[in-house]
Amino acid sequence: MKAVAATEYGGPEVLGLYATPKPTPKPDEVLVRVRASTVGPANSAMREGRPFPVRFFSGIRRPTSIPGDAFAGEIAASGREVTRFAVGDRVFGTTAPDSGAHAEYVCVPEDGTLELTPADVSDAEAAAVADNGLTAILFLHDVADLQPGQSVLVNGASGGIGTFAVQLATHVGAEVTGVCSTRNVDLVRSLGAHAVVDYTTTDVAEIGETYDVIFDAVGRGSFAGFEDALNPGGLYMTTVPSVGIFLDMARTRLVGDRRAVFAATGMKPASVRKQYLGELRELLDDGVIRSVIGRRYPVAEIVEAHRYVDTGHKRGTAVVTIG
Ligand SMILES: NC(=O)c1ccc[n+]([C@@H]2O[C@H](COP(=O)([O-])OP(=O)(O)OC[C@H]3O[C@@H](n4cnc5c(N)ncnc54)[C@H](OP(=O)(O)O)[C@@H]3O)[C@@H](O)[C@H]2O)c1
């Protein structure tokens, strides 16, 4: 089969399509014929091998595994113990914390983070949900336990995670404010945000509003930068790890009544990821959430897909189509 691989750590140009053996499912696994996957900043970070310690897992000299974790496609074969899925079923899910989805085929345990794709949802839309939808719901429901009537600020509301976060928080019944640039204000409003702050003209810290939850979906801010915009007992959550956030997490556990938290989809127990993907499937099927797809690229244009992501200004999710 064809799969994406990198010859070394570096810019988008290190990526290419190579022939590699098609995987064989174990007795409890299904073989998924991948039709769509996603590319985001986490893929760029792995491609660049930063921060350096990731290389202890991904290969010291060059990345040794096929990138990509979210996927949508159909079941091409199944192991002899599989009962939940049949060949031909359309499915979507994620291999996180592992990778391997930027390929024609990937093997996934049948009890992994895997669901049937709703009939009128495209593979591209489903893959976006399995990536950014899953991260957004884990932060808002599992970490923040968001409640109706709470006020939420979503920083990076027009990005991959942010576009889902706005919709999910609105659905809970929270009062949602999105932060984005001028060109994305209409998009963020259309997703249900009650208010939108244009970061190119307005500094959230200076408008005098305060929130119960600040979700830094794009991870460009800091706890210190947002602390004054948090209500007493408020929570700041970020998707991006840093020395600063780890120090803030330790400090805010001991001092003060505002908390800072970093969390990661791949660090959640598999049962939690699975539960929330099931909830997302229901929301998708009921038309409560939709995927915003900024751009689609055939996998042969994986270099261009990474270049788009590396601008730092992608809109919603970037999808690669395969086959
Ligand atoms: N912790 C986890 O489990 C986890 C999982 C997946 C991804 N991540 C990380 O989460 C981060 C966000 O991923 P993503 O795919 O959502 O990002 P993204 O889509 O690449 O973010 C780009 C979006 O952010 C907006 N933006 C850029 N600068 C901004 C600023 N200063 N203030 C507010 N908005 C700004 C851009 O809007 P404009 O174009 O309008 O500026 C654009 O729409 C990445 O670092 C990724 O690695 C973490």
Image: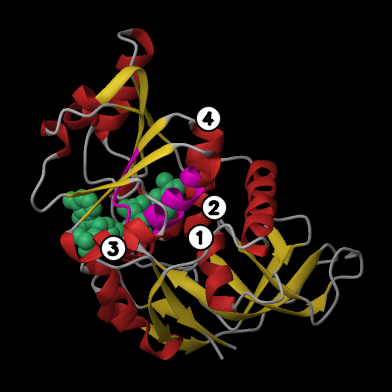
* Residue at image location 58% in from the left, 57% down from the top: 288
Q: CB atoms at circles 3 and 4 under 8 Å apart?
A: no
Looking at the image, residue 161 lies above or below residue 124: above
Figure quadrant of residue 40: bottom left
Beta carbon at label 1 within 8 Å of ligand 1: yes
Magenta segment: 153-170
Between marks 2 and 1, how big is the CA–CA gap?
Answer: 6 Å
The residue under label 3 is 186
Q: Amino acid at mark 2?
A: Leu
Looking at the image, residue 1 lies above or below residue 105: below
Image location of residue 152, percent across then percent down: 37, 36
Q: Amino acid at mark 4?
A: Gln
The residue under label 2 is 134
Disc 2 vs disc 3: which is toward the camera?
3
Q: Amino acid at mark 1?
A: Asp
Figure quadrant of residue 30: bottom right
Q: Earlier in the sequence, mark 2 or mark 3?
A: 2
Image location of residue 296, percent across then percent down: 41, 82
Q: CB atoms at circles 4 and 2 under 8 Å apart?
A: no
Disc marking residue 131: 1
